[in-house]
């Protein structure tokens, strides 16, 4: 039975320069060994299912094709869908916000480097507060101060000296809901209504 993973492509915007189209992206992942690949939104977030191959191997095999067809060549992060669902289930952002919070975020990275500061941690501008970090994911709340919105990606990259990419908690919630809730059949089939 296939296992579901979410692939987070850094700096990808489907259909724009140096990014593939949805079809190119999904085709590259399927050709690289994913049994299915379904893009979610246009920001380089894709659900793949794999059976006999590691999801990282699928992503690594797809990279040359993505470079050839679109020029895309950046960092990619893979996380199990059930891990994201479990994180949301425990409601990690409860009690961490106030009326000034702009967004709750998930920042993905691959680094064993220690963050090097106690949590929760707030940057000098006060527009990023990292509330939890572990397993290649930093959970943050960000603020908009004047016209500037905090960047958890920039903060994580600077502290860990490694690439990262961020999605809002809303995006992760919608993704988990879409791909974990059972599909229900209509109350009546067409044949029953005739």
Image (spheres, rainbow, N blue to C red):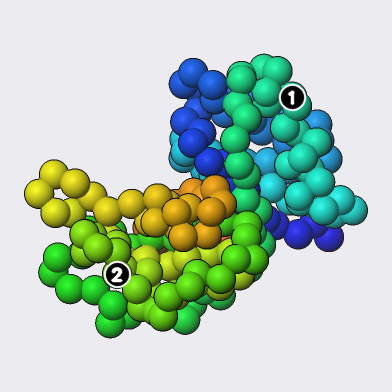
Above/below status of 172 relative to 37: below
The residue sitting at the right extreme is: 52
SS of the residue under disc 1: helix
Report the Cα–Cα distance between label 2 and label 1. Answer: 40 Å
SS of the residue under disc 2: strand
Residue labelled with disc 2: 122
**Quarter of the image that includes the C terminus:** top right
Q: Is residue 57 left or right of residue 8?
A: right
Q: Is residue 129 left or right of residue 2?
A: left
**Residue under the point 61% across and 20% down:** 71
Say the numbered circle drawn on residue 65.
Answer: 1
**Residue situated in front as seen by the camera: 93 or 82:** 93
**Residue under the point 23% across and 50% down:** 149
Above/below status of 86 relative to 150: below
Mark 2 surroundings: few (<14), some (14-19) or many (≥20) residues within 10 A: some
The residue sitting at the left extreme is: 146
**Quarter of the image that includes the N terminus:** bottom right
């Amino acid at each position: 039975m296939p296992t579901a993973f979410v692939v987070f492509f850094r700096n990808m915007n489907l259909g724009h320069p140096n990014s593939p189209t949805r079809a190119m992206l999904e085709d590259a992942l399927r050709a690289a060994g994913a049994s299915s690949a379904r893009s979610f939104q246009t920001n380089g977030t894709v659900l793949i299912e794999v059976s006999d191959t590691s999801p990282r191997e699928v992503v690594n095999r797809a990279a040359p094709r993505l470079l050839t067809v679109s020029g895309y060549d950046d960092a990619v992060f893979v996380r199990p869908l059930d891990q994201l669902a479990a994180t949301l289930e425990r409601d990690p952002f409860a009690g961490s916000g106030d009326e000034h919070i702009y967004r709750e975020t998930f920042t993905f990275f691959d680094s064993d480097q220690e963050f090097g500061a106690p949590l929760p941690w707030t940057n000098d501008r006060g527009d990023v507060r990292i509330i939890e970090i572990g397993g290649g994911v930093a959970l943050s709340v960000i603020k908009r101060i004047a016209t500037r919105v905090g960047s958890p990606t920039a903060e994580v990259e600077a502290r860990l000296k490694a690439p990262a990419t961020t999605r809002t908690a809303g995006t992760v919630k919608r993704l988990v809901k879409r791909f974990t809730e059972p599909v229900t059949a209509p109350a009546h089939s067409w044949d029953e209504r005739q």
